[in-house]
Each structure stands twice: as structure tokens, then as C-alpha cells.
Image (cartoon, rainbow, N blue to C red):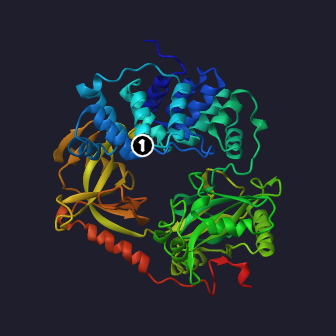
């Protein structure tokens, strides 16, 4: 069978090649070679969208709404295996549902007899995604999936599922690399491509504009969210003159972009999802004011009794499309703005931060909009003093922002720096090792870590997973761990090894969050290696009850009220 240039097979094969290739430049070249052979604008749009954004454009507002269990139980039925006894243990071992499905479909005879790749085109795959979007019933969605899988190879199915998830394809090739490939394919300046994507909100549209030499036609539209400016850890950037920065407290909340025009208000999360229905009081706050067309960058926080409350309480509001009166009363939220990106028909992305701040302060004063407090800094002593004040408020730390910076959409540079300290650490046991990709190909560099439940009546196991980590160790430590892994491997599941509980890792993390989809019911936010505890044994590992206790302590901790030296300015109080 001849593989068509616009087939989904070819996109899946390209994604797999990118995953197994070392070096970002080599990965980009693979996608450039792929993209160059696509002729139709729609194929170019879909290919870049699928690889970067998912089944639907970030600004489309569409979601397929297909749950993990819907996919997993259908896959088990497809293979004619028991979901609980076979599929779930296989998925736990591999650490990836899509990877598990690929391996099962390739190796189980009952599954092999059911699928046959028909070399579906990108546009045919898009039609399947659209069908899932307009279908509401679970059994109908499963029938669409079943019909689609019978027409694809296991490799195609793996990437079909990952694309459907609207997240990273986990191949070491994120949006900035796709932008780079677009620029190289069509001979455009990278910054021009990035700017067009930022103001259009769509990587697919940007690729088509680049192909047709029309990047200058990109224009910002209200209610199409733009990529957020990101911060780098201060430890990763050399700062020679702190006086070039201003400081703001880093809130214990949720990043949000607010678009306001003629009484219409829409809120977007950091992943550009529409979240307006979850926070009706913020929508009501803005819609009740006579405001010019605005786009504000800020944070949603639970705010009660003059105090910003923990992020864990905000989680109770996140994802709730129609919060009850009780929920609104228990966990009232506030939008605190710290940047203005668009005002009355004028994009402000290229204005300096100091200029944008003046506009934001005028807007705040006129319309009583909460905005961050900014503090001048001159040296490290100032940073340490303000950092402690932020912690007293219950906030995460500080943001340092260059006064002469423009809004660098989707970038992590020196313009915004975050000063934080870890929320805590746990002694965990390494349970699974996953093969790395790219420059770490050939080694096991991603690890699933667990906590002890051997004395916990709720569980039969000795250890259960609490998080995954793939950083914080040196090359020498990685080499030493890989040597040990050979001796403690119990079973191999494709690229994943089940390990004998032996090696203890002190795992550092930003926060503990509830995650009911996991066995522990909790997950760690941004976990990374703090230390490899060669001196400890699995009996020294922390327990799930330790995790539960740390979570509760975070909620119960005393926080300073927004009185003297507040972290944000609430004009309505004056």
C-alpha cells in the first residue's frame, strides 16, 4: 500500500520518528520534510493543529469529551480481555493508556483480526473528531471510536488517542518547535510566525498564512485567547541588575485571561480553555461595568474574609460548569489583574511593561478593578524581604518582571522570573522506569514514584503511585540508576519496566492536589528529584497518610489578611 502524503498514517509515523530522534534540530527537520510535501491548505492546517493543539484548534471552543475510561473499556472489549485483570495492570505498567492500547492491538490475536489500516487522510480523521464532538451519548461515541479503530493501524490509533486528548503528544516536540518548523518550511522569520500565532490564536491558521505568504494578514480578534507570557525560575537565569525589575506576589490561584466587550465576558484558562461558566461572579463583575474592549491577564483566587485562600479550595470550583449557591458562598473567587493586553481597539503586546502598567492602573482606578501591588527592588535583600511577606500572605512567592519588557507570548525568557520555594518533599519508592526519548533515548529517564500503603487497610498493595518525575538528577546519577535498574527489574512491558521496590527518591514538589482518577486520589504538582537516597530502604518511605496530612495542613495554615502591605490593590475599598 502506498502511503499518501496527506494520510494520517504518515503523520503518525512522523510523530513516532520525532519521538525516537535525539536533538531538537533533528526533530524539526523531520517535521519540515513532512510539512513540505503537503500541498492542500487544509492538510497543512490539520497537520500542524494535530501535532501542536490536538483534535481541535485551541480557539475553537470544541472538545470531543471522550473520557479515559470510555476509551480504555472499549479497548479491552476490542481485545476481548478483562478490563480490571488485564488492561488496568498493563496500563499501570506502561504508564500510558495509548501506549498500552498500541501494544495490545499489535500482539493480541483477537485484536489483530479486527483492524486494517485504510490509509485515512487527515481530513477523514478530522471528520471523525467532528463526529465525536457533536455526539453526546457514551455508547454512540464508543461506536464511532470502534468504527475508526477498525480502519487504522495500532500506531495510528495511539496518536489518534493522544491527539484526541488535546494535550502534549509526549514526543518531545512542543508548539515552539512546530512554529520553528513552519518558519523553516516556508522561509519565514520565526518571530513573525510566533507573532501571527499569538494574535490569531491558531497554529493551523498560522501555518496556512505562512504557506501563502500572508502572515501580515494576521490580526487579533476578541474572544480568541492568546498564548500566555510565561516565567522562568530565577535559578535558571543570570540576573545582573535587580533594579531593572519590579516585584509582585505570585498568587496561589489559577491563571486567567479575561476578554470583555460590550457586556460580553469570556474567561480562558492557561491551556486556552473557556472557563466562564465556572466563575459566574467574575463574569457578572465585569459585565456590570461600562468598560472599553479589554483583554486582561490575571489570576483567579478564592478570596474570603480579606484573605487569599489555598489553591486546593479553588480546585473545588474548577471544572464545575454551574456552581451551586452553596459553592459560590463557601468559595467566593476574585479576578486580580496584573497585565492589560488590549484596550479599545488597540493591541498592547508590544508596549513596555511600564507603559502597560500605567494603563492598567488608570483602568483600575476608574472602574474599581483589583490589580496587583508592585514593589520596587534594588538588591537581593529586598527580594528576600518581599518573598517572606508573600509567604506570610499564603502566596507562592514572587514574580520579578522587567520594566522594559514587551508581552512575550508563550515564551520563557528573562523578562519574567519566578522566585519560589518547594511546597514540600516526600521520600518515595521507584516503582516503574520508562524509556526516554530524544537525547535520552536508550536510557530509562522517566520514573513513576510511589508511597507506602502497607499498613493502610484501604489497600492490598505495599506501594501505590503518587507521581511521575523526569528531572532533578545529574547525568552521572542517571547512569548509576540505570545500572541498578537492570538488577531490580521484575517485568518488562514494552518501553516500561516494573521494578522491585528498592530505590528511594526524595521527591520535591510545588503542591499536592486531589486527583480522583488515581489510586492514591492525590497527585503531586511539578514533582522532581531532590535527592537519590541510596542510604534509605523502602521501609523508610513516606505513606499515603503523610500525603493526606500535608494536604490538610496546607488548607488549614494561617494566612495574613490583605491589610498592611497587601499583595493586591482593591480600589473599591477606598
Quadrant showing the C terminus? bottom right
Residue 241 is at least partly visible in this image: no
Give the camera-side residue of 506 and 560. 560
Q: Label 1 crowding class (10 Å Cα cut-off): few <14, some 14-19, many 20+? A: some
Give how far across and how far down residue 378 sits, in percent.
66, 74
Q: Which residue: 60% across, 41% down?
A: 57
Count of numbered labels shown in the rendering: 1
Q: Which residue: 75% across, 47% down?
A: 221
Q: Which residue: 77% across, 56% down?
A: 348
* Depicted 311 relative to depicted 141: above or below: below
Q: Residue farthest to the top?
A: 1
Give how far across and how far down residue 425 sits, in percent.
35, 67
User: Where does label 1 land, which residue?
Assistant: 138
| Residue 457 image-quadrant placement | bottom left
| Residue 340 image-quadrant placement | bottom right
Residue 559 is at least partly visible in this image: yes
Amino acid at each position: 500500500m502506498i502511503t499518501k502524503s496527506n494520510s494520517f498514517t504518515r503523520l503518525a509515523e512522523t510523530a513516532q520518528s520525532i519521538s525516537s530522534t535525539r536533538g531538537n534540530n533533528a526533530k524539526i527537520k523531520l517535521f519540515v520534510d513532512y510539512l513540505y510535501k503537503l500541498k492542500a491548505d487544509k492538510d497543512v492546517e490539520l497537520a500542524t493543529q494535530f501535532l501542536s493543539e490536538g483534535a481541535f484548534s485551541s480557539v475553537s471552543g470544541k472538545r470531543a469529551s471522550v473520557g479515559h475510561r470510555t476509551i480504555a473499556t472499549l479497548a479491552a472489549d476490542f481485545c476481548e480481555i478483562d478490563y480490571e485483570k488485564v488492561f488496568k495492570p498493563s496500563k499501570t505498567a506502561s504508564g500510558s493508556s495509548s501506549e498500552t492500547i498500541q501494544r495490545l492491538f499489535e500482539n493480541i490475536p483477537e485484536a489483530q483480526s479486527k483492524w486494517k489500516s485504510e490509509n485515512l487522510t487527515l481530513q477523514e480523521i478530522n471528520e471523525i473528531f467532528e463526529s465525536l464532538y457533536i455526539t453526546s451519548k457514551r455508547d454512540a461515541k464508543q461506536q464511532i471510536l470502534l468504527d475508526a479503530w477498525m480502519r487504522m493501524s495500532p500506531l495510528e490509533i495511539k496518536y489518534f488517542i493522544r491527539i484526541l486528548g488535546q494535550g502534549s503528544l509526549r514526543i518531545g516536540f512542543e508548539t515552539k518547535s512546530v512554529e520553528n518548523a513552519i518558519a523553516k518550511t516556508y522561509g519565514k522569520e520565526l518571530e513573525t510566525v510566533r507573532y501571527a500565532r499569538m494574535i490569531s490564536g491558531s497554529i493551523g491558521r498560522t501555518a496556512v498564512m505562512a504557506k501563502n505568504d500572508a502572515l501580515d494578514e494576521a490580526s487579533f480578534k476578541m474572544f480568541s485567547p492568546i498564548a500566555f507570557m510565561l516565567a522562568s525560575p530565577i535559578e535558571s537565569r543570570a540576573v545582573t541588575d535587580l533594579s531593572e525589575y519590579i516585584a509582585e506576589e505570585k498568587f496561589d490561584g489559577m491563571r486567567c485571561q479575561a476578554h470583555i466587550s460590550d457586556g460580553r465576558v469570556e474567561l480562558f484558562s492557561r491551556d486556552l480553555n473557556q472557563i466562564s461558566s465556572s466563575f459566574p461572579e467574575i463574569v457578572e463583575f465585569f459585565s456590570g461595568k461600562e468598560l472599553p474592549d479589554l483583554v486582561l491577564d490575571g489570576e483567579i483566587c478564592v478570596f474570603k474574609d480579606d484573605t487569599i485562600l489555598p489553591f486546593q479550595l479553588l480546585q473545588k470550583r474548577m471544572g464545575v460548569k454551574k456552581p451551586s449557591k452553596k459553592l459560590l458562598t463557601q468559595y467566593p473567587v476574585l479576578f486580580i489583574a496584573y497585565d492589560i493586553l488590549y484596550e479599545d481597539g488597540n493591541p498592547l503586546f508590544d508596549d513596555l511593561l511600564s507603559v502597560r502598567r500605567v494603563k492598567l492602573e488608570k483602568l483600575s482606578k476608574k472602574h474599581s478593578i483589583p490589580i496587583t501591588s508592585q514593589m520596587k527592588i534594588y538588591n537581593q535583600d529586598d527580594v528576600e524581604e518581599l518573598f517572606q511577606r508573600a509567604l506570610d500572605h499564603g502566596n507562592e512567592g514572587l514574580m520579578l518582571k522587567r520594566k522594559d519588557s514587551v508581552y512575550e507570548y508563550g515564551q520563557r525568557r528573562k523578562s519574567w522570573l519566578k522566585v519560589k520555594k518547594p511546597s514540600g518533599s516526600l521520600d518515595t519508592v521507584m516503582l516503574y522506569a520508562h524509556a526516554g526519548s530524544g537525547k535520552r533515548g536508550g536510557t530509562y529517564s522517566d520514573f513513576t514514584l510511589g508511597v507506602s500503603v502497607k499498613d493502610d487497610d484501604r489497600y492490598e498493595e505495599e506501594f501505590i503511585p503518587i507521581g511521575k518525575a523526569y528531572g532533578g538528577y545529574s547525568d552521572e546519577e542517571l547512569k548509576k540508576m540505570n545500572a541498578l535498574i537492570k538488577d531490580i527489574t521484575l517485568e518488562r512491558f514494552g518501553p516500561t519496566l516494573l521494578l522491585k521496590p528498592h530505590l528511594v527518591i526524595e521527591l520535591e514538589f510545588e503542591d499536592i492536589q486531589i486527583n480522583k482518577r488515581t489510586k492514591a486520589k492525590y497527585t503531586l504538582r511539578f514533582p522532581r528529584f531532590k535527592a537519590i537516597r541510596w542510604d534509605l530502604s523502602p521501609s523508610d518511605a513516606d505513606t499515603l497518610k503523610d500525603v493526606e496530612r500535608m494536604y490538610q495542613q496546607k488548607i488549614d495554615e494561617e494566612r495574613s489578611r490583605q491589610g498592611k502591605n497587601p499583595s493586591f490593590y482593591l480600589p473599591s475599598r477606598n
